[in-house]
Amino acid sequence: MIKTWRWFGRKDRITLSMLRQIGVEGIVTALHDIPNGAVWPAAAIEELRDFIEAAGLRWSVVESLPVSEAIKYAGPERDGLIQNYIQSLENLGKCGIRTVCYNFMPVIDWIRTDLEHPWPDGTTSLYFDMAEFAWFDICILQREHAEADYSPQVRKRVHELDSAASPEDRRRLVENIIVKTQGFVNGNISEKDTDPVGIFRGLLEKYRGMTRDDLRENMRYFLSAVMPVCEQYGVNLCVHPDDPPMPVLGLPRIVTSAEDIAWFLKAVDNPHNGLTFCAGSLSAGAHNDLVPMARQFAARTHFVHLRSCDVLPGGNFIEAPHTRGRAHLVELIRIFEKANPALPMRVDHGKNMLGDRGYNAGYSFHGRMLALGQVEGMMAAVRNEIENELI
Ligand code: DNO
């Protein structure tokens, strides 16, 4: 596979020349300054592409070209926004950028409650604690009937958390769940917003009463509309799975399991309609068995995120080191290397270690560099197996 790295543009403290030194071949990035829903101008795409190429790298994948909320909830602006999306895909295709990652999660992208969960060795990882999340949902967001979505044990802990919490604890939880993990991925809320919870409630309202089938229908509508331009310019679209892969906050989520993936691939059965196989997101669901899933979907996988989770009792999960966890990265690499050695892959999040500070949540430098080294070692061993016909 091609070794890529998520880079946040010229403002990123991690420079392209640093990335070359650690063996990165391709860049995963987006036009982060263009507001969600607006067309990506060809000139801006070309300019960034040339900047990356001047550093001896190439722009391998767009992550993400965000799908606006009104497309997901089928608001009146949907068709105009889809036209903008088509125009952006055309501009990308003409500039030779042909792998585009997006997601179809309503309101909130990936979710963690703790961004610095300590390991005994002094490093930290991202973590999801179901009771903390329920506390946010029930007591901070105060979503109607939220209690009904959690077990009695979780509700008991919510009560304990709520009576012991300081205003600072509340502020930090809101920041972790809907600000720090969202803003930089082109989310709906940015660090500058003064009332993130209010904005969030307004967005949730747009989905009131929406079922899983309604959301599926909206995804099918979107995919059918954009496939012709993907075919014309050879662009591969690849949806990122929902993270975590389960319904949250009363919202449906529809890219959570093998059944879901099989559904959207068939609903619009076109090779340009594909998957980002995010091993981290999928392995956060105890229902997902990743090795058979990789076998089943390798042919329609256009981009791979290598990361692994451990699922803990009560629905909590932790981001495991890349050599461990339930995703079985070595096995996944065997499958994807054999299916398509030109697939772009990136290590997804890494630990915070050796002084990593101030990076976007999950996107540390040392932690990701260590993970890249570990994964590169696995890839070398697998290539050796393939060359010697051992697998
Ligand atoms: C988090 C990421 C996601 C991902 C988007 C893709 O670290 O994996 O935010 O980039 O969901 O659209």
Image (spheres, rainbow, N blue to C red):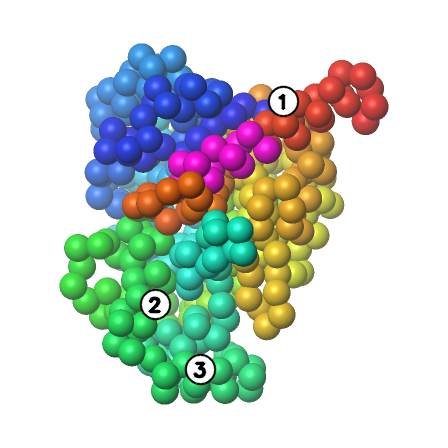
Q: Residue at x 71, y 25 (%)?
A: 381
Name the amino acid type tagged 2. Leu
Which residue is nearer to you in this view: 43 or 360?
360
Looking at the image, residue 137 sits to the left or right of residue 33; the answer is right
Task: Check residue 365 for magenta coloring.
Answer: yes
Other residues around mark 1 within 10 Å, as few (<14) / some (14–19) / many (≥20): few
Q: Which residues are magenta?
A: 364-374
Q: Are marks 1 and 3 in contact (CB under 8 Å)?
A: no
Is disc 1 placed on a helix, strand or loop? loop
Task: Check residue 229 for magenta coloring.
Answer: no
Q: Main secondary structure of the magenta part?
A: helix
Q: Nearer the viewer, mark 1 or mark 3?
A: 3
* Residue 184 higher or lower than 54, as above or below: below
Other residues around mark 2 within 10 Å, as few (<14) / some (14–19) / many (≥20): many
Indicate the quadrant containing the C terminus: top left, top right, bottom left or bottom right: top right
Name the amino acid type tagged 3. Val
Q: Residue at x 63, y 22 (%)?
A: 341
Which residue is nearer to you in this view: 14 or 56?
14
Is disc 3 placed on a helix, strand or loop? helix
Name the amino acid type tagged 1. Pro
Sequence-earlier tag: 1 or 3: 3
Q: CA distance from mark 1 to mark 2?
A: 41 Å
Total numbered labels placed on residues in the image: 3
Sequence-earlier tag: 1 or 2: 2
Sequence-earlier tag: 2 or 3: 3
- Indicate which disc residue 158 carries: 3
- Indicate which disc residue 173 carries: 2
